[in-house]
Image (spheres, grey):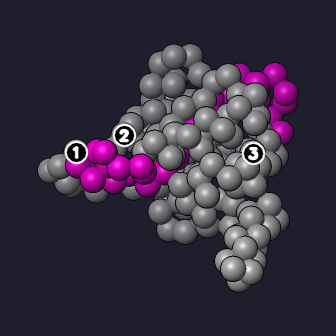
Amino acid sequence: WWADMAFVGAVADLVRKDLAKWPESRAREAKVFFTAHSIPSSIAKGGPYVTQFEETAGLVAKELGLKNWGTAFQSSAADSSIPWTGPDISDAIRAAKKEGVADVLLSPIGFLVDHVEVLYDLDVEAKKTAAECGVGFVRSGTVGSHEKFIGMLADRVMAKLSK
């Protein structure tokens, strides 16, 4: 459902609500990062994971009319000797700071609910990185119980049951 407009709409609603925590001019200049779980690059190569993630991010950005947005990954293996998909969200925040970005909003679109990887990787580690860089930080929610997301799931179940 990465490109289902109900899923995209649910994410867009959450990001819109969270951008509203800043004054309009500040929200307009903030960089929005969409995140997903990092996976080994060898597994990602040739598969749909990264492409679908990037497509979802692009659809949400279009829905919101975002001009300053990007994608990043989280939760890669810290001591792995193999490459993982990137950039890592903390590296992306540091790069954004170097580009003159003053505020970031992180939207974990690769996750359906807040769990330990979202809570730690974003709410602790990424937030700490943003603070060290002097960058404003807001973390958007996951779609979990958003009515558009639940409606999409219900529609899919009903479609299967009616066959």
Is 11 colored magenta in this rendering? Answer: no
**Label 2 packing within 10 angstroms: few (<14), some (14-19), many (20+):** some
The residue positioned 74% from the left and 65% from the top of the image is 152
The residue positioned 75% from the left and 36% from the top of the image is 63
Asked whether residue 111 appears in the rendered view, the answer is yes
The residue carrying mark 3 is 12
Asked whether, in this view, residue 68 is left or right of residue 132, the answer is right
The residue carrying mark 1 is 83
Q: Quadrant of residue 119?
A: bottom right
Hey, which residue is sitting farthest left in the picture?
Answer: 81
Q: Which residues are magenta?
A: 20-49
User: Which quarter shows the C terminus?
Assistant: bottom right
Q: Nearer the viewer, residue 50 or 73?
A: 50
Q: Mark 2 or mark 3, which is nearer the start of the sequence?
A: 3
Q: Position of residue 84 (x, y in %)?
A: 28, 47
The residue carrying mark 2 is 86
Q: Nearer the viewer, residue 117 or 85?
A: 85
Give me the C-alpha separation between circle 3 and circle 1: 31 Å
Hey, which residue is sitting farthest bottom in the picture?
Answer: 161
Q: Amino acid at mark 1?
A: Pro
Asked whether, in this view, residue 69 is left or right of residue 151, the answer is left
The residue positioned 75% from the left and 28% from the top of the image is 65
Give the structural element (helix, strand or loop) at label 1.
Answer: loop
Whether 89 is drawn above or below 67: the answer is below
